[in-house]
């Protein structure tokens, strides 16, 4: 039995595990990491509709040996429901932000898994998608800033 450390990123903040958990097997390590993610997501739900939660597990020597992640993405599908505007942001802007964040996560995972070099063409295409999403977000924000405000 060995001690493993479960470092957590809740979508906003990183928390390093100082105490660790004793696990009897590597299966126990992965099972524990995966089982903790829904609890973390549940605690953080009020802080935003789109989040990526992850846990990276370190062994006793400090080497990362396992990663588990959970993506939470929610979206309004209509501007108005039952005659009332939804409480979220512009549908297009929300969709672009979700896309940008998911693409960034894919690129990070490829790099962390050591596959960026082997999959250079895919990483390059994903990078273009990330850049285009960011450009479109800026464009929508700029257009929104020029609209007259009512009230």
Image: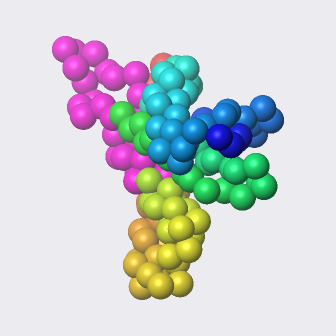
Comparing 50 with 122, the one in front is 122
Comparing 74 with 133, the one in front is 74
Magenta span has 78?
A: yes
Comparing 114 with 136, the one in front is 114
| Quadrant of image for the N terminus | top right
What residue is shown at x 51% (from left), y 39% (from top)?
28
Q: Position of residue 52 (x, y in %)?
A: 51, 42
With respect to residue 45, does 57 lie above or below? Answer: below
Q: Is residue 101 left or right of residue 90?
A: right
Residue lying furthest left in this view? 82
Q: Position of residue 56 (x, y in %)?
A: 62, 48
What residue is shown at x 50% (from left), y 76% (from top)?
115
- The reply to whether residue 44 is visible in this rendering is yes
With respect to residue 82, does 97 lie above or below? Answer: below
Magenta span has 10?
A: no
Display coloring: rainbow
Give the residues in magenta.
75-101
The picture quadrant where one finds residue 49 is top left
Q: Is residue 86 left or right of residue 42?
A: left
- The reply to whether residue 41 is visible in this rendering is no
Q: Position of residue 21 (x, y in %)?
A: 67, 33
Comparing 46 with 135, the one in front is 46
Q: Position of residue 101 (x, y in %)?
A: 49, 52
With respect to residue 49, does 115 lie above or below? Answer: below
What residue is shown at x 68% (from left), y 43% (from top)?
2
């Amino acid at each position: 039995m060995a001690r493993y450390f479960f470092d957590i990123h809740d979508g906003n903040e990183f928390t390093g595990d100082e105490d660790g958990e004793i696990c009897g097997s590597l299966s126990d390590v992965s099972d524990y990491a995966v089982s903790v993610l829904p609890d973390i997501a549940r605690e953080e739900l009020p802080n935003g509709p789109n989040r990526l939660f992850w846990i990276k597990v370190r062994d006793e020597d400090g080497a990362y040996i396992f990663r588990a992640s959970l993506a939470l993405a929610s979206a309004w599908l209509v501007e108005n429901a039952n005659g009332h505007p939804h409480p979220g942001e512009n549908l297009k802007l929300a969709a672009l932000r979700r896309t940008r964040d998911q693409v960034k996560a894919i690129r990070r995972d490829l790099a962390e898994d050591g596959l960026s070099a082997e999959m250079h063409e895919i990483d390059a295409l994903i990078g273009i998608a990330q850049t285009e999403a960011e450009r479109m977000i800026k464009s929508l924000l700029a257009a929104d800033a020029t609209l007259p405000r009512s009230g």
